[in-house]
Image (tube, helix red, strand yellow):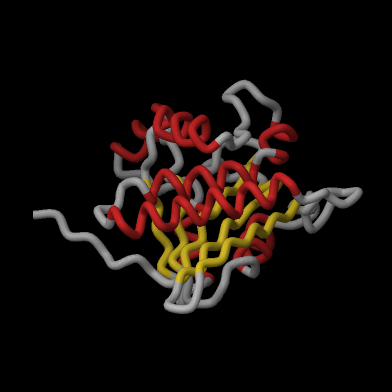
Amino acid sequence: MNTFDLPPSVTCALSIVRDCIELAPVSRAVAASAFVVTDDTVSTAFDVRTAVILPDLSRQQSIEHIASMIPHGARVIMRSPRLPRGLVRHLSKGRPMPAPTDAQALAALRPDCDVRSIAVAEDAMEGVASYFKIWRAGKGDTTAEKARCCEGEAQTLYLSQLYTTPYRVERNRLTAAYQAWSALQRARPLGEFGPTEIF
């Protein structure tokens, strides 16, 4: 029998863009976006927190900076990294991971949060992004292009996860609230440098 958690009051879908695969020790975070959904007995609110990560920060400093974007006590969802075949062979021989995943590092830094790494198929992400008209980077896009789409990636992750829950009434309510919020966001004029924290 499957069991499902009740929806949390604060959910944070986190997307981190790196210059190479996440599990490479030399991998550097370039940008991050946290899509924060606060849903309690009073109201439902959406917030996007995006930052460009400065290149002189270490891996640990980058994760600490990203962790500061997350509300206290939130459930954090992150997309599980794909494991390259070479790494699978490496692990099958009993060797250690070359580097902790972002979810592991974040969970260690933020014990107040419920950090979950979830597997979402790419075609599911594409379908959700297409339905909600969310701009996502393509597989062959540059790191800079992926960084510009970081907010959309976080939103797509949240919505993809939302559609795996069995609470249909809650799902429909949150979807309608998101669509209303998204329409307002699209109508809002951007500042000279857009919504990001650092450029």
Nearest the eye: 198 or 172: 172
Which percent across, then down, holds residue 175? Answer: 45, 51
Which percent across, then down, holds residue 85? Answer: 39, 27
Q: Is residue 10 left or right of residue 91?
A: right
State the quadrant of the N terminus.
bottom left
Q: Is residue 156 left or right of residue 88?
A: right
Nearest the eye: 136 or 115: 136
Outermost residue to the right: 192
Residue plotted at (66% across, 25% down): 141
Residue plotted at (37% across, 52% down): 172
Which percent across, then down, holds residue 63? Answer: 62, 60
Instruction: Establish if 34 lies above or below 157.
Output: below
Which percent across, then down, holds residue 197? Answer: 79, 58
Q: Which of the 4 image quarters holds residue 2? A: bottom left
Instruction: Establish if 30 lies above or below 128.
Output: below
Nearest the eye: 73 or 90: 73
Residue plotted at (51% across, 56% down): 177
Instruction: Establish if 44 lies above or below 191.
Output: below
